[in-house]
């Protein structure tokens, strides 16, 4: 009896948790929105860093509801070089004329006579003809007028003045004998090909000579004379190749005053520019 009364008393305490209900899943939705926004932000930052200006315009056009009438670049690299058919600012900047003339060309009959066509149609047809000639020189049309060796020396661009064909020196392949206006054989071949292409259209032609700057200042700078002599040498070459002399309206030498690249003494600045003038440019 005594032993039973002295036994330790064990008290068991129970912790009763009364359910008060959950607080809902609203925080999960907010967290998911936050994560999605962060992913979109980092994706945007990556796109801004990894794409060009034309590609960004193309992406913007894709998400724009007004793509059919958007007057900006389409972001592609095809025939329009990333420009949409509605571009006006870009066409003026690359020298392709106004969009109105090109649009009139697309709406006109391919067999329309230039003599009786509206001015916008004539301008559009002429721009297309000049672009076709440039493609033939650079083999973009699939019909190569020049060998790969000669194509290294040529770039073309279409401006408001006309089609400019730029023929330039390379470090390992100059066009003239050093310090003279005596053409090398490769320049004769290039001149023959250019004359053949220019013979397709009746537009007037101008020739300009440029030379690189001298590394030192000379009392008698020969660059003016040398650039002019080289321009005349090119004129003789294209005339010998069959270009009518009456089509030559201007032969000039610019010395080293208009370098194409920097530094001014770079070999790339030794160049000739042959311009197939637009018909609406006064002679």
Image (tube, rainbow, N blue to C red):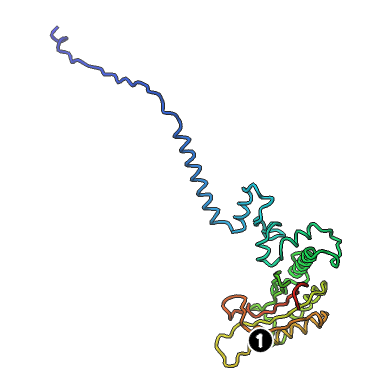
Residue 143 seen from this side = no
Residue 32 image position (x, y, % from top left): 48, 38
Q: Which residue is mark 1?
A: 178
Q: Quadrant of the C terminus?
A: bottom right
> Which residue is nearer to you in this view: 89 or 181?
89
Q: Secondary structure at mark 1?
A: loop
Quadrant of the drawing holding the N terminus: top left
Residue 200's x, y, as percent? 82, 72
Left or right: 252 with respect to 114? left
Total residue callouts: 1
Q: Is residue 139 above or below residue 7?
A: below
| As drawn, 105 above or below 242 | above
Q: Which residue corresponds to the image point at 44% horizontal and 29% vertical from the top-left?
A: 24
Query: Where in the figure is residue 95, as x and y percent of width and height?
Result: 69, 67
- In this view, the residue in front, 164 or 105, is 105
Closer-to-camera residue (63/197): 63
The quarter of the displayed image where residue 273 is located: bottom right
Q: Residue sitting at 65 percent across and 77 percent down?
A: 170
> In the rendered image, is residue 224 in sight?
yes
Residues packed near mark 1 inside 10 Å, few (<14), some (14 to 19) or many (20 plus) = few
Q: Position of residue 41 (x, y in %)?
A: 50, 48
Say above or below: 141 vs 67.
Answer: below
Residue ID at (73%, 83%): 251
Q: Indicate the quadrant where residue 228 lies.
A: bottom right
């Amino acid at each position: 009896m005594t032993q039973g009364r002295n036994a330790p008393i064990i008290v068991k305490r129970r912790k009763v948790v009364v359910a008060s209900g959950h607080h809902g899943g609203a925080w999960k939705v907010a967290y998911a929105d936050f994560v999605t926004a962060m992913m979109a932000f980092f994706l945007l930052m990556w796109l801004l860093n990894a794409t060009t200006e034309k590609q960004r315009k193309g992406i913007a056009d894709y998400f724009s509801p007004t793509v059919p009438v958007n007057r900006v670049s389409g972001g592609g690299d095809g025939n329009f070089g990333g420009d949409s058919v509605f571009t006006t600012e870009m066409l003026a900047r690359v020298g392709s004329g106004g969009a109105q003339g090109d649009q009139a060309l697309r709406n006109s009959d391919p067999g329309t006579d230039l003599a009786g066509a509206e001015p916008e149609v004539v301008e559009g047809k002429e721009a297309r003809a000049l672009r076709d000639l440039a493609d033939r020189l650079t083999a973009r049309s699939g019909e190569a007028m020049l060998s790969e060796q000669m194509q290294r020396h040529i770039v073309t661009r279409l401006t408001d003045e006309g089609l400019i064909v730029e023929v330039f020196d390379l470090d390992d392949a100059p066009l003239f004998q050093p310090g003279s206006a005596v053409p090398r054989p490769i320049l004769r071949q290039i001149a023959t090909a250019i004359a053949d292409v220019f013979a397709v259209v009746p537009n007037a032609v101008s020739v300009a000579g440029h030379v690189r700057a001298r590394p030192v200042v000379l009392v008698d700078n020969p660059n003016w004379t040398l650039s002019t002599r080289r321009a005349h040498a090119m004129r003789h070459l294209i005339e010998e190749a069959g270009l009518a002399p009456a089509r030559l309206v201007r032969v000039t030498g610019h010395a080293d005053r208009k370098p194409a690249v920097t530094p001014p003494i770079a070999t790339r600045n030794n160049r000739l520019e042959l311009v197939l003038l637009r018909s609406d440019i006064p002679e």
